[in-house]
Image (tube, rainbow, N blue to C red):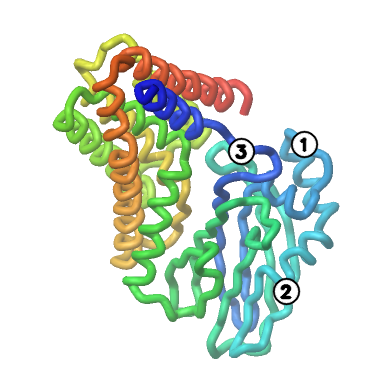
Amino acid sequence: MRRWLVFSGLVMFLFGCGVTTADAHVIASTGYSTVSQDGSRVNYLLSLEYAVLARAVDLGAPTEDDAGREDALEAARPRLAEYLDERLVVSLDGAACEPELAGTSIATRATKPYADLALTFSCPGSTGSFHLLYKVFQDSDAVADDHTNLVEYHFGDRTGRTVFDRSHHDFTIGDDSMMTSSLQFGRMGVKHILLGLDHVLFVIALIIGAQSFKSLLQVTSTFTLAHSVTLISTLLGGIAVPAIVVEPLIALSIAFVALENLLGATRHRLPVVFGFGLLHGLGFAGSLRITDAVSGDLLVSLLSFNVGIETGQAILLVAVFPLLLLVRKSGYAVPAQRAATGVVAAFGLFWFVERFFLS
């Protein structure tokens, strides 16, 4: 009986990692903000996942083309402005600035449609303490279980980045320290890999294929090196690969490694992992949008994000590898590992078809 519990536990853990949430909720949602001061006016470009926003504001029947989405946004502009009124507030010295939703458009990011909302805030002056309050998708009946918004701001000579989430929803321009920013980006990195189901399943496929703890360290170190190279290079402007290319290949990498495990063809695992690690680094970079010039603060933010990714990866290793060792000591080691690997391969192939042929 205990052996069957271990067997079922591994398969159900992997199946649970791959199952998507119901239409009413999503596990994680990422948004982006670019905020800049122009005299007494603050320009705020807010970018949100269209599907999540559509459920929060009720943008009407789902549509599969950008033209239809743009029409829906335009028709719902009064409702959008009302929804954002208390959830996105810019104030100067405690006095709220007057908001206006100046425009809406559709953009694509990591194969997902995003709603770009251009807001302007008219403030009672141009000098003083500017404060941002952000509570989008953070209501008690929120449509996203976890929402993060990555912010870049430019107020005169004060520029920087911050992250809004459930535990951090207000910010005073110029108040951030390097330590605070590092912790925020590190936490974002942890959440990104643990909530990114494709990256999770790729790492799990590597763990299942490892024959020893030494080989596990080798493949995970190779993966770390590779994705760090492309993550930093992409965000600093060295590489530009469209998400429509990267995302299907990431899905294919999951299926490829899983099928290698099933066939026992892991002799060349390290170069394979390095190549696919470069792809996953491009995927990690897709969760950020950096437009600042290279600076010490920017490098610290990027390194903190990468450290967060490694921390999340370590959490996966600690959670899965001991379970794998238990399975290998049981009488059902071979069928259990094959079943779990088959689940991983199936999700990889499904995501590849979805991202390549149906997106």
Q: Residues within 10 Å of mark 1 (few under 14, many from 20)?
A: few
Question: Is 45 positioned to the left or the right of 103 in the image?
Answer: left
Q: Position of residue 98 (x, y in %)?
A: 73, 79
Q: Is residue 122 above or below residue 25?
A: below
Q: Secondary structure at mark 2?
A: strand
From what the image shows, is residue 107 above or below residue 264? Answer: below
Q: CA distance from mark 3 to mark 1?
A: 20 Å
Mark 2 is surrounded, within 10 Å at the Cα level, by few (under 14), some (14 to 19) or many (20 or more) other residues, namely many
The residue positioned 74% from the left and 59% from the top of the image is: 103
Rendered location of residue 71, percent (x, y): 81, 46
Q: Nearer the viewer, residue 148 or 233?
A: 148
Q: CB of mark 3 within 8 Å of CB of mark 1?
A: no
Q: What is the three-letter code of the residue carrying label 2?
A: Pro
The quadrant of the rendering that contains the C terminus is: top right
Image side of residue 17 versus residue 115, left or right: left
Q: Which residue is mark 3?
A: 21
- Eye-nearest disc, 3 or 1: 3
Residue extending farthest to the left is: 214
- Amino acid under disc 3: Thr
Assess disc 3: are there few (<14), some (14-19) or many (≥20) residues with their C-alpha within 10 Å of its C-alpha: few
Q: Earlier in the sequence, mark 3 or mark 2?
A: 3
- Residue 252 seen in render: no
**Depth order, front residue of 216/104:** 216
Q: Secondary structure at mark 3?
A: loop
Quick check: can you spot residue 215? yes
Residue for badge 1 = 63
Instruction: State which mark lies toward you, 3 or 2.
Output: 3
Residue receiving disc 2: 99
